[in-house]
Image: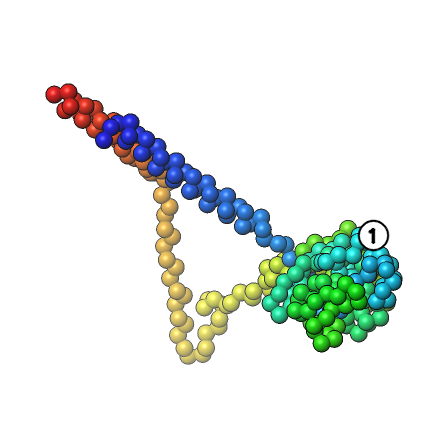
Amino acid sequence: MSARFGLRSFALFTASAVGALTIACVAAHADSDNDEKILLKGSTTASYFWDDASGRAGDTGLPASGKRMQKGMAASPSWPLLTEGYVVYEGKKLPFFVGDRGPGEPSSRGVMLDLDAKTFAELTGGRFNPDTLGVDGVGGQGHIEVDYVITKWGDGVGKKNHPVAFSTRAWAKRDTNPAKPPQVMAEEKPEETPEETPEEQPAAPGKAVAAPPQKAAPVQAAPEGEVEESSAVGSVLLVGVLAMAGGGAVLGGERFRRLIRR
């Protein structure tokens, strides 16, 4: 084996190890970036609509946000326009953004979300009918129970909390006190009442008082100088091992060439 071959193998091994560590770090960072921030969670009854300003199916014109009717657009009776999130129905998860207002009167009966017809069709296994603007293949089903998750609030007026009926006109008021994210509420723990120690508990008449439990002696930490020295020694040993590996390959090659010359 030549010295050049030994050094090349050692370099390839080192590059592979560094590359693997780099990929692992990048993957971990990417996973953390994909985490969605949940601002609100809840459940409601959802209907569907498709307003394309054609006058069909009783639509009243273009959506209130000014955006064209499209898949993923939902109507809310109280959330700010351009609020984003997703719904879950029977294990299926689809995104939405609030682009219109509604339902109107049905929101007073608990129907707090109006999904676009294409999203409704995909959730229920039906088919969107472009002629009627309805959903076929679901037996006339027009309402489903869904779970909703809000991941981003819109910047405009509207209630940044669980939806309320259109008649409350919450859609026209600016909300400066949005709901606390579920993660924050889960982290808030009630204050724990400290338990009485044996010294605080009064002794019963005629009974001996038990001695308080002995505390274990604290473990003394090694001085900072020793910790730093150990780390330095470990680093030196690691560098030495790597240097010996590379040097061994060079020496092996030199000896091999001397044998050939003889």
Please give the count of numbered marks on the rendered protein. Answer: 1
Q: Residue 180: in sight, yes or no?
A: no
Look at the picture and state if 111 lies above or below 2.
Answer: below
Element type at mark 1? loop
The quadrant of the image that shows the N terminus is: top left
State the image quarter where residue 58 is shown: bottom right
Horizontal placement of 148 versus 212: left or right? Answer: right
Sort mark 1 into few (<14), some (14-19) or many (20+) by Cα contacts within 10 Å.
Answer: few
The residue lying at 32 percent from left, 31 percent from top is: 8
Horizontal placement of 65 versus 216: left or right? Answer: right
State the image quarter where residue 46 is shown: bottom right
Q: Amino acid at mark 1?
A: Gly
The residue lying at 75 percent from left, 62 percent from top is: 116
Look at the picture and state if 75 lies above or below 240.
Answer: below
Colouring chosen for the image of the structure: rainbow
- Read off the residue under disc 1: 66
Q: Residue 155: in sight, yes or no?
A: yes
Residue 212: x and y, percent?
A: 41, 65
Residue 258: x and y, percent?
A: 16, 22
Residue 16: x and y, percent?
A: 39, 39
The residue lying at 39 percent from left, 64 percent from top is: 213
The quadrant of the image that shows the C terminus is: top left
The residue lying at 77 percent from left, 51 percent from top is: 155
State the image quarter where residue 76 is shown: bottom right
Q: Nearer the viewer, residue 49 or 88?
A: 49
Q: Residue furthest left?
A: 262
Q: Nearer the viewer, residue 172 or 49?
A: 49
Horizontal placement of 65 versus 239: left or right? Answer: right
Q: Nearer the viewer, residue 56 or 209?
A: 56
Look at the picture and state if 174 lies above or below 107.
Answer: above
Horizontal placement of 201 versus 143: left or right? Answer: left
